[in-house]
Amino acid sequence: MQKGEQTKTTGCLCFSRQSKSEFPKTFKKSNKILKKYTKNNSDISDDAILEVMIRLYISDNKTKAIEMLQRCRINPNFQMNLIRNDLEYYIPQLINFMVFHQQLQDDRLIEFIIKASSIDFFFAHLVYFQLKSLSKIISPNNKVEFKIVQQFVKEFEDKMTMNYQGNLLIAAQLLKIHLEDSFQDDVLVKSIMLSNKKDKQEQAVYQGSLRIKSWKQNEIVQTYGTDNWIDYIKDKNLQDFLVTKHEEIELQDYISIFQNKEDNNLQEDYAFQSNINFWNDITTISEELSKHQKKTEQLHQFLNKINQNLPAAVYVPFVKNSVRNYAILNIVSKESRVFSTKMRSPYSLTLEIFRPEIEGHHNEQQKLDTQISKPIKINMIKSQSISQSQIIMQNQSNINIQLQRTFSIADAEISFHNEFQTMKLNDTKMVGSYENNNGIGQFYRNRLESNKNESDIDISSEEMVDQQQIKQTNQQLAFSLESQNPQTQNELQNSKMDSSTLNSRVSYLQNGKGVILTEDEYLQIKKTIFGENSISQQERIKKSSPFQKLKSWQLVHLIIKTGDNLKQEQFALQLICQFDQIFKKEGLPLQLRYYEVLSLGPDCGMIEMIKNATTIDSLQKNLQTKYTQFSDFSDFFRSFFRDNIEQALQNYVQSLVAYGLVCYFLQVKDRHNGNILLDDQGHLIHIDFGFFLSIAPGKGMEFEGKVPFKLLSDYIKVLGGVKGYLFQDHFRKLFYKGFKACQKHQKEILLLVEMMYTGHGTTLPCFAKGELALKELEDRFNPRVASDAELFVYVQGLINKSLDNWRARWYDKFQYFAQGIFY
């Protein structure tokens, strides 16, 4: 930091003169770690948000970096196939920097965060949850409270509460007022606004809609989902009481069921807290269930009580599938299941949701999505045509945008110093204590009792990989690549997987292979293994819902967890999302089914549930106990997907390659069959990322330690074995092209990891190795090879080393004897 700038502001102090032990070393090393990415003061375009983030982390001139942030897009673009290039995506890195690097001392960055949060309530809520998650670091043997962060969270909440007071925070209102002039000229938006005037409703503000009362009080809406519902509807015909107009639904703020009446009265008309109160109640339920014996019964009672306050202006803060643009109507309590352990009671949650703005404009949904995807930027506030939202913001309370501090910079400095002295999460004892983390695989398993007395099943010699054959094939492939001319090598790099070629080579999987199933057998196996199909479930629930006539009605499925630090899981899924974007940018047919995770507090959060999928563990249990007509996993795959084998194989190999690359680069461990799913379309999907980069389960017996990634012969046999065309021609070549793509865009992964490490290095177990973890990650992207041909040989070597690696096999056996997880 330049001396002149330091005297002018109360900016970042973590690189000024401090004693060596005052702050974690990772903060001080951020300049050294990230400096290699600077571009000698070259101009950065507004959409190069990652470059702006680098400037923020390492630039001496923070004012310039924050000015760049003001030109960056805040909100996601729902029309970009989830290619994320918005500040909301980087909220973990932004808050990481503001808290751990600057100890909440730079008023300029705080002012930017407040401004962005003041014009986009989605951004504000995500900032709140991220701050709250960092306010306390909880591990099995240690708990550290960051009192200054907790104080800042309270001040931020108060600030946003005043800012949004009197509004209903639902996405529909983003379509009515926009900071850009062109938006207000839109014909569709004008028609929406005119229809509202017919109902004598005031024009909505940008930050949300003005609080209104619906013209009709619908008794069935009030009763649905509560304990009184069954008695209420038993003598009535549901079809006579359906909600046919969305105006009949009164969306108001959600009132917590766990707060006393006095607190709720104090929070009346505090819109910003509505969504916070709802999710606080949802996570509190998980904690309360641990106190009860009949957990499922108690869960349903809690959820029915919440339904008394629904529908409400609350939403699921996920981006994918535009789910956050929907308001929550009801919790389908009977669909919820508790998966309790001695200490925790995670549970599944099924929500009915709808999207108000498309009810009257269902045929215009594409236009509506276009409008809601228009960029929101801080510098738009300076536009001469001030929006109504800004006028209301100024008139409501004339609040200064800057947060009024209740703590001094000196207090913050002393507090962080004292609290970090107590933190020893990188200690070896602390790393080991994370090994009993309960995964989410239990939510996907068929809950059959495993037979622990069964004798171990030996792998026959026919199933094991012929290593000599691998070496010979590898040499042939390498020679073939080396002898090709440059044009042919370039085609190999850039070509996509040819579906027609794939389809022409799979006849051996259809003729005389697998079991021919009748339609009834197929449907019964599908229901037993994959559970009720999501579409069937949706139709079943819809028939019993008074909201069934709403055009935008749908279900969303979540997992609620408490007692676990989900910040690392959220970080892992951000990285996997980035890998997925890399594959999309390069046009590679690699499929990652990443799911969204959001940490809602220091030890609680929500996880998107993947439907129509089962764990390989659960599948193997069924194959070995109930469906013994299938000889193995490969035989089941060929039989079950017989009628659509080409597409199923394509999905299988593309997801197998994609997750293989992710698991190699990030060194994802704990890859037993309880953490790998198969869906009813043939995709393999990995879940539960509690061990990656630095840590692996084992406490000294790290079975997976030297395995590049899990690739057992059971998986390859589906492709015809190691000698099969699908494995040799498609898997190997696609893995190489995917490796090249990741290598080309490695900066996108390295930066996310390095930025998080320079702050979170003392709080996340995945950074237990310190800077060595960063070096090893970069080394994996950059093997010491001199040509593409050598790289091809190197990549094939990784595949060969992973194939049926005895360490991976023994880890599966260990999990079988320790936890009954089949392999």
Image (spheres, rainbow, N blue to C red):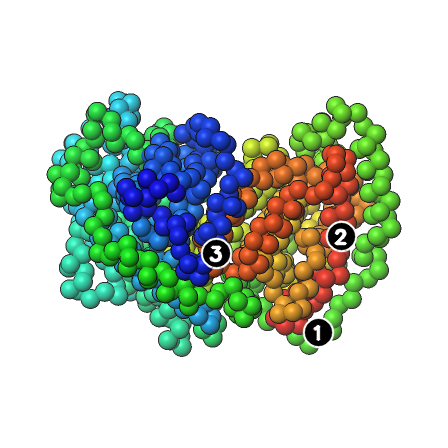
- Is label 1 in a helix, a strand or a loop? loop
Q: Quadrant of the N terminus?
A: top left
Mark with earlier residue (2, 3): 3
Residue 108 higher or lower than 530, as above or below: above
Q: Position of residue 215 (x, y in %)?
A: 16, 43
Of residue 510 and residue 430, the one placed in the foreground of this image is 430
Which residue position is annotated with label 3?
25
Q: CA distance from mark 1 to mark 3?
A: 52 Å
Which residue position is annotated with label 1?
454
- Is label 3 in a helix, a strand or a loop? helix
Name the residue located 81 percent from the left edge and 28 percent from the top edge: 484
Of residue 534 and residue 427, the one placed in the foreground of this image is 427
Q: Position of residue 794 (x, y in %)?
A: 75, 43
Q: CA distance from mark 1 to mark 2?
A: 30 Å
Name the residue located 53 percent from the left edge and 67 percent from the top edge: 427
Looking at the rendered structure, the kind of residue marked 2 is: Lys
Looking at the rendered structure, the kind of residue marked 3 is: Lys
Name the residue located 20 percent from the left edge and 35 percent from the top edge: 390
Which residue position is annotated with label 2?
801
Q: CA distance from mark 2 to mark 3?
A: 36 Å
Q: Quadrant of the C terminus?
A: bottom right
